[in-house]
Image (cartoon, helix red, strand yellow):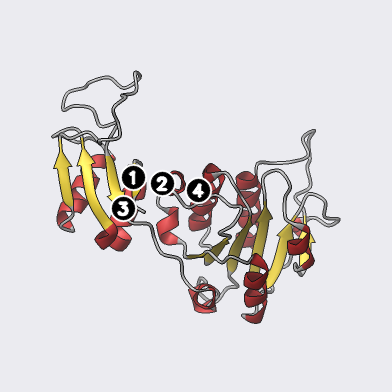
Amino acid sequence: MQLHLRNPHSILAALATRAHDVREIRLNTNRPQGAWTQVAEQAAANRVSVVYGSAPQNSRRRPKSVESKPGGRTGAAMAIVNPRQPVDLKDLFDKSSANGDSHGLWLALDCIQDPQNVGAIFRTAAFFGVAGIVVTKDRSAPLNATVYDVASGGLELVPFSAPTNLGRALEAAKSAGLWVLGASEHAEEDIADVGPDRDWLLVVGNEESGIRRKTLSQCDVVRRLTPRGELSSLNVSVAAGILMSHIARIG
């Protein structure tokens, strides 16, 4: 499977980290503008094929909101990229991947099904220096082009594993010395009670049902984000960002 990426920042990240997997850049103008100029330059520097003035074959319908400008349109520009390969759990939980001498943070996504949420979580994880992410193969969003583009380069920067069994991944994390922290709105204690004295694997769950019961039973501790206003829940990617921010601040 090849990915058709349309976010120039996700393409630039792929060129910077694994240019050999970028098969071709397609620009429907001879004079790219903005970040696409950097894409063309980096592609040329890495000897990646750049096709100018050629719209993608699968883009027959053009957005009405995009108007022709001097130098041509760039709205349909794209890159054909091989997907990034997952790493083994043993390598993912290698503590040498954590930042400096401080305790590290890893994530596990328990059946998150919206690619937009997965991409946003990867982007935030890259921002906070998360050491690795576990994404389940079954009942989860595939790591498709939407995830890569929403992550805006984050998926190139954070290692990930894709096991078929999340439970085994949690056991592997514990064997590596990590503590498993489940995030649930039904928890009795707030995330503020979490201390900075260990390496954490933070588990966040499905958009509708949260963390599965079996997964919760494997968590060492379960904590919530306590609402201060009228709404009692958050989008999972927003909640994950707040949790990452808290742990990164105290870690």
Res. 193 visible in picture: no
Amino acid type at image mark 1: His
Whole-number angstrom distance, CA of label 3 to CA of label 1: 6 Å
Which amino acid, mark 2? Ala
Residue of label 2: 145
For the residue marked with disc 4, what is the amino acid?
Gly
| Residue that mark 4 sits on | 119
Residue 177 drawn at (x, y percent): 65, 79
Asked if the residue under mark 2 is in contact with the one under mark 1, i.e. CB atoms within 8 Å, the reply is yes
**In the picture provided, is 25 more to the left or to the right than 88?**
left
Q: Are marks 1 and 4 in contact (CB under 8 Å)?
A: no
Viewer can see residue 203: yes
Q: In terms of sequence position, does the residue under pointer 1 or pointer 2 come before the other?
A: 1
Q: In front: 203, or 103?
A: 203
> Is the residue 188 above or below the residue 174 in the image?
above
- Counting from the top left corner in percent of width and height, residue 207 is at 67, 45
The residue at the point 78 percent across, 35 percent down is 229
* Disc nearer the start of the sequence (4/3): 3
Numbered tag placed on residue 229 in the rendering: none
Q: Residues within 10 Å of mark 4 (few under 14, many from 20)?
A: many
Q: Work out whether mark 1 precedes mark 4 in sequence or the reverse, and give the earlier one.
A: 1
Q: Quadrant of the N terminus?
A: bottom left
According to the image, label 1 marks what residue?
A: 4
Residue 229 is left or right of residue 19, and the answer is right
Left or right? Give the position of 116 relative to 72. Answer: right
Q: Are marks 2 and 3 in contact (CB under 8 Å)?
A: no
User: Mark 3 = which residue?
Assistant: 81
Please provide percent x and percent y for residue 187: 82, 55
SS class of the residue under badge 4?
A: helix
Of 126 and 168, which appears nearest the observer?
168
Q: Earlier in the sequence, mark 4 or mark 2?
A: 4
- How far is the residue under mark 4 from the one under mark 2? 10 Å
